[in-house]
Amino acid sequence: MKVRAVIMDVYQTLLEVRPPAADRDRVWERLWFDFFRQAPPLRLEDFSARCEQIIRRDHAEARARGIPHPEVVWAAVAAEAAPDLAALDPADRDRFLLGQAQTWHEVRLMPGAAEALRILAQRGLWLGIASNAQPYTLEELSAALAPEGLGLALFDPELCFWSFAHGFSKPDPHVVRILTARLALRGLGPGQILMVGDRLDNDLDPARAQGWQTWRLNNQEESPGGGSWRRLIEAGLDG
């Protein structure tokens, strides 16, 4: 497999996503009290329901403007659902939203990902990310990498597509198009780019449609066109 750049998804690829803690309602109450010194004005269930309504409205408005795969600004959604959040300064708001994300899921580094990243970097490959994400995603990924002595500096900023920063998301073909163009400026053709992700619809099909190679990340040691991080490295990535 001859590639010179590897673009990766985050959730269920670099980060394993697991269910939240059983006491997530209590976590929500503690989180709110830590920032506002009072009980939350609405239950976590109600906050989530309001956010879903706002997202559906924003998505419908964006689609009406010709954006088929829109992305929201999560901080704005959360502040509309819980107006007290607007009083927080940006740093505190981001810390709150990171804590709030933990009421929805827990994450840890995918098995084999740390060693694979080290090897890919040692081989001189350009590394990037294509993720449907929010700012807290970067914090989650950074925290998961840190115990392994790794960090976000592994990934070339110009080769990272974070949906929250663009207003649209995968599987929009422009995600792959943008990264293809940026790599073309470095002399790479589409066939020299590998997409690693867990989903056909969001990750692999859009990449294949524009000539990229693909690897479907899963924990099966024997899987056509995919497998674990360990299997990917064993398959060989020659620049």
Image: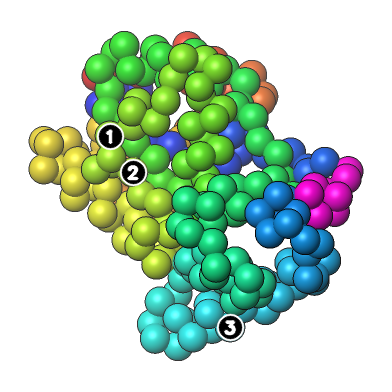
Nearer-N-terminus badge (1/3): 3
Determine whether the residue tagged by mark 3 lies in a helix, strand or loop: helix
The figure's colour scheme reads rainbow
The structure residue drawn at horizontal position 27% and vertical position 55%, both measured from the top left corner, is 177
The structure residue drawn at horizontal position 47% and vertical position 51%, both measured from the top left corner, is 91
Residue 156, disc: 1
Outermost right residue: 22
The structure residue drawn at horizontal position 19% and vertical position 46%, both measured from the top left corner, is 182
Main SS of residues in magenta: helix
233 relative to 191 in the view: left or right: right
Q: Position of residue 211 (x, y in %)?
A: 30, 45
Q: Nearer the viewer, residue 38 or 137?
A: 38
Above or below — where is 234 with respect to 32?
Answer: above
Quadrant of residue 88 within the rendered picture: bottom right
Residue 160, disc: 2
Q: Is residue 161 visible?
A: yes
150 relative to 38 in the view: left or right: left
Q: Is residue 78 magenta?
A: no
**Disc 1 to disc 2: CB gap under 8 Å:** yes
Within 10 Å of the Cα at label 3, are there few (<14), some (14-19), or many (20+) other Cα atoms? few
Q: Is residue 27 magenta?
A: yes
Determine whether the residue tagged by mark 1 lies in a helix, strand or loop: loop
Residue that carries the numbered disc 3 in the rendered image: 57
116 relative to 6 in the view: left or right: right
| Identity, as a three-letter code, of the amino acid under mark 1 | Asp
Magenta-highlighted residues: 22-30
